[in-house]
Amino acid sequence: MQKILVPTDFSANADNAAQFAIDIANKLGSELHFLHSFIISSRRADVMKNMGKVARNEAEGNMAKAIIKFKPMLVNAASARGEVMVGAAADNAVYYAKKNGCGLIVMGTQGATGALEVFIGSTTGAVLKNTPAPVLAIPAGFPFRPFENIVLALDNQPLPSRDVFAPLQKLAAEYKAKVNIFHHRTEEGEKGVDRAVERYLGGLDVSFHEVAGGTNVHGRINLFVEKTGAGLLCMVRRKRGFFEGIFKGSATLKQAYNSPVPLLVLIGG
């Protein structure tokens, strides 16, 4: 996580997410890459050229102000740079993260204010579905606080590689956080979480927790997050499995996206 991408639209929500990115960068000595995207809507070439120049000048001015604002908050060799790009914010974020080798993307989300269908179609949702880099999504209005207690929600599928859990291991170690591994058993006789994950999180304070019954997995996770007082929820995105099931399964498709705390999405197989 030596390079951290922070997509921004210069809103209060984006600035709030930036506080989390800055704190992580200060602990790791990371380089923050602030990225702003804008779209030119006109189809006429002459109008597009003029609008593009105006829009870029405005965006670059706002980016310069943002960098000036955030730089004094950086310590421990952490640094910040800004980039402005034309195009859809989600596409640009995914492209930029790949091109520049960003090991983490930190961005805000509207969280509980919108339906899940809206979230999936949003910039954050699109980035989560397409990026190869882990994403830390910060709910709107969630105040910054250190990650002292973390919930890692896992299914019973084979674990992805140790490298997938490296960002979580690094963050938990830096914040000296406890990791509560949570599993929702939906069927009788179902096997539990592979305990090898404890080796992947070597050196951390790890505990295992399991509940059984019911189909509202997302609701059970949120209850456990609240019960433990966790400041961070971590999940693994799979092509087929727990995370994708939550976002695509018919039982949860109509639920509001309401993670009560920041969500760290690790990218698995």
Image: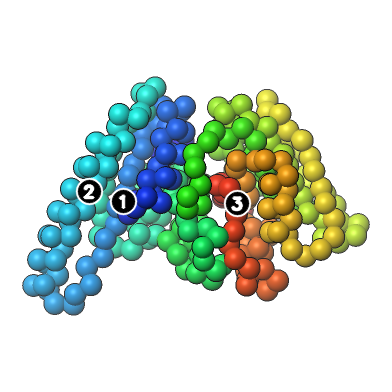
Q: Is residue 14 above or below residue 52?
A: above
Q: Earlier in the sequence, mark 3 or mark 1?
A: 1
Is any atom of residue 240 visible in this view?
A: no
Q: Amino acid at mark 3?
A: Pro
Q: Quadrant of residue 173?
A: top right
Dot 1 crowding, Cα within 10 Å, few <14, some 14–19, many 20+: some
- Residue 142 at x, y percent in the picture: 51, 47
Q: Which residue is mark 1?
A: 10
- Residue 214 at x, y percent in the picture: 81, 63
Q: Locate residue 104 relative to residue 86 in the image: left or right.
A: right
- Residue 34 at x, y percent in the picture: 32, 44
Task: Give residue 260's mark.
Answer: 3
Q: Earlier in the sequence, mark 2 or mark 3?
A: 2
Q: Locate residue 192 relative to residue 72 in the image: left or right.
A: right
Q: Locate residue 52 relative to residue 68 in the image: left or right.
A: left
Real-space CA distance between mark 2 and mark 1, rounded to the nearest whole angstrom: 7 Å
At mark 3, the secondary structure is: loop
Dot 2 crowding, Cα within 10 Å, few <14, some 14–19, many 20+: some
At mark 2, the secondary structure is: helix
Which residue lies at the image location 18% right of the left edge and 77% below the top edge?
43
Which residue lies at the image location 63% right of the left edge and 49% below the top edge?
235
Q: Earlier in the sequence, mark 2 or mark 1?
A: 1
At mark 1, the secondary structure is: loop
Asked whether the residues under the numbered discs 2 and 1 touch, taking CB atoms below 8 Å apart as contact, a structural biologist would say yes
Real-space CA distance between mark 2 and mark 3, rounded to the nearest whole angstrom: 30 Å
Q: Which residue is mark 2?
A: 62
Is any atom of residue 246 visible in this view?
A: yes
Q: Amino acid at mark 2?
A: Asn
Q: Quadrant of residue 196?
A: top right
